[in-house]
């Protein structure tokens, strides 16, 4: 009895998500162990700490860009800096 396409896609999605979560856990645990080996303490043991600390700011900027692009027409290609300057010039706030 063949499986339907939706079940196959669901299983594939589950397997890929599970693998990504396992990889993330292994990455964090190995990073913490390695940093502890080099005598780091506190929050310094977090692998790529700068990235994880700045991630909420990146998400906020991308959400603002998405909302702004959805409301007003933007000529592409543009850089984030150009879009930010245009938003500030128009009086929009993050």
Image: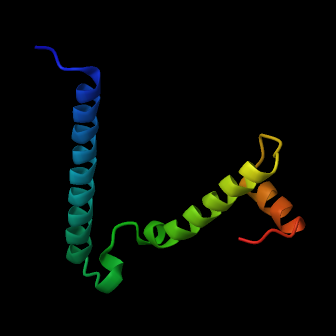
Using residue 58 as the reference point, say whether residue 52 is left or right of it. Answer: left
Q: Residue at x 20, y 57 (%)?
A: 26
User: Looking at the picture, does residue 8 appear above or below residue 18?
Assistant: above
Q: Residue at x 47, y 71 (%)?
A: 50
Image quadrant where one finds the C terminus: bottom right
Q: Residue at x 64, y 63 (%)?
A: 61
Using residue 2 as the reference point, say whether residue 71 is left or right of it. Answer: right
How are the colours assigned in the image?
A: rainbow
Residue 55 place in picture, x, y as percent: 50, 66
User: Looking at the picture, does residue 50 appear above or below residue 63?
Assistant: below
> Of all residues shown, which one is farthest toward the bottom?
42
The quarter of the picture where residue 1 lies is top left
The quarter of the picture where residue 58 lies is bottom right
Toward the viewer: 48 or 68?
Answer: 68
Residue 17 place in picture, x, y as percent: 27, 45
> Of all residues shown, which one is farthest toward the left?
1
């Amino acid at each position: 009895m063949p499986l339907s396409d939706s079940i196959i896609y669901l299983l594939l999605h589950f397997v890929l998500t599970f693998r990504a979560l396992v990889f993330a856990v292994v990455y964090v645990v190995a990073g913490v162990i390695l940093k502890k080996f080099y005598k780091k303490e506190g929050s310094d043991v977090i692998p790529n700490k700068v990235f994880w600390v700045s991630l909420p700011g990146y998400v906020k900027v991308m959400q603002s860009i998405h909302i702004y692009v959805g409301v007003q027409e933007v000529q592409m290609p543009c850089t984030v800096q150009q879009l930010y300057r245009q938003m500030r010039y128009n009086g929009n706030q993050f």
